[in-house]
Amino acid sequence: QVQLQESGPGLVKPSQTLSLTCTVSGDSVSSESYYWSWIRQPAGKGLEWIGRIYNSESTIYNPSLKSRVTISVDTAKNQFSLKLISVTAADTAVYYCAREGIVVVDAFEIWGQGTMLTVSS
Amino acid sequence: DIQMTQSPSSVSASVGDRVTITCRASQGVSSWLAWYQQKPGKAPKLLIYTASSLQSGVPSRFSGSGSGTDFTLTISSLQPEDFATYYCQQTNYFPRTFGQGTKVELK
């Protein structure tokens, strides 16, 4: 059974860098059958796709965040990570990692439980 | 970006009711449309992909239809566990975009 688990600091100060990690079990982040994505949701609001990584190196980002975002993979730990620089209060949200299918299920088929990130001094 | 607009924003319904939620894309996305269910404090759960394909394990009372710009999610007979917020999402263009959500509430 494939599971995703986010981890992160919980609280980050404005202008600092946010780093989140998604640990994957039951599958490989190097798999060529899936994309590995980050999605966020401010409290009481809708979902925003941040970006994804494929085959450990190919990335696509939301243009609204592209200048501040990096998604990378650690194949040894079977994790993928999100780095967001110069955070502001607007980045406060629950952050989800998700697996997106390519061939059969072209959607976010498996999600982590989410990690809350608050930007505050 | 492709704008996804759901209607209604909320719906009040009773157990056993038939509920229909509409999603409109600002431009055609073919059949590249997914539906998710989200309960408070939980991650979204995939219900439907490619507009009408039922995700494994999802009850058959959920169904999806449509193509191009107009899509619907139908719950044929609402069950107590179906009270939640539902989101559509287009999977045809970057960036991936979601609707604003439709909350299904108890009447």
Image (cartoon, rainbow, N blue to C red):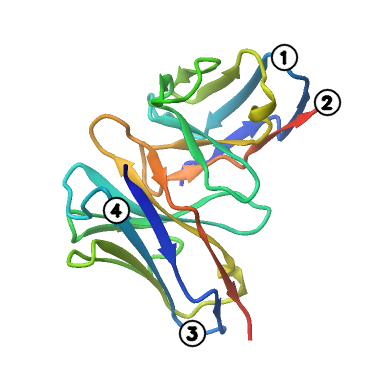
Say which quadrant the N terminus of chain A sits in: top left
Give me the C-alpha separation between circle 4 and circle 1.
Answer: 39 Å
Give me the C-alpha separation between circle 2 and circle 3.
Answer: 45 Å
Specify the amino acid type for callout 3.
Answer: Gln
Q: Are marks 2 and 3 in contact (CB under 8 Å)?
A: no
The residue to which callout 4 is attached is: A25
Give me the C-alpha separation between circle 4 and circle 2.
Answer: 41 Å
Residue located 71% across and 35% down the image: B9
Indicate the position of residue B45 as horizontal and vertical percent values.
Answer: 49, 38
- Relative to B62, is B32 on the left or the right? left
Give me the C-alpha separation between circle 1 and circle 2.
Answer: 10 Å
Indicate the position of residue B83 as horizontal and vertical percent values.
Answer: 69, 31
Up-down relation of residue A44 to residue B4 (above or below)? below
Give me the C-alpha separation between circle 1 and circle 3.
Answer: 49 Å
Tag shown at residue B107 = 2
Indicate the position of residue B33 as horizontal and vertical percent values.
Answer: 43, 30
Q: How many residues crowd mark 3 within 10 Å: few (<14), some (14–19), many (20+)?
A: few
Up-down relation of residue B65 to residue B39 (above or below)? above
- In this rendering, do the residues under marks 2 and 3 share a single chain? no
* Circle 4 or circle 3, nearest the eye: 4
Specify the amino acid type for callout 2.
Answer: Lys
Residue located 54% across and 50% down the image: A47
* Circle 4 or circle 2, nearest the eye: 4
Q: Earlier in the sequence, mark 4 or mark 3?
A: 3
The residue to which callout 1 is attached is: B17
The chain carrying label 2 is: B
User: Which residue reaches farthest front?
Assistant: A1
Q: How many residues crowd mark 2 within 10 Å: few (<14), some (14–19), many (20+)?
A: few
Provide the secondary structure element on which disc 4 rests: strand
- In this rendering, do the residues under marks 4 and 1 share a single chain? no
Provide the secondary structure element on which disc 2 rests: loop
The residue to which callout 3 is attached is: A16
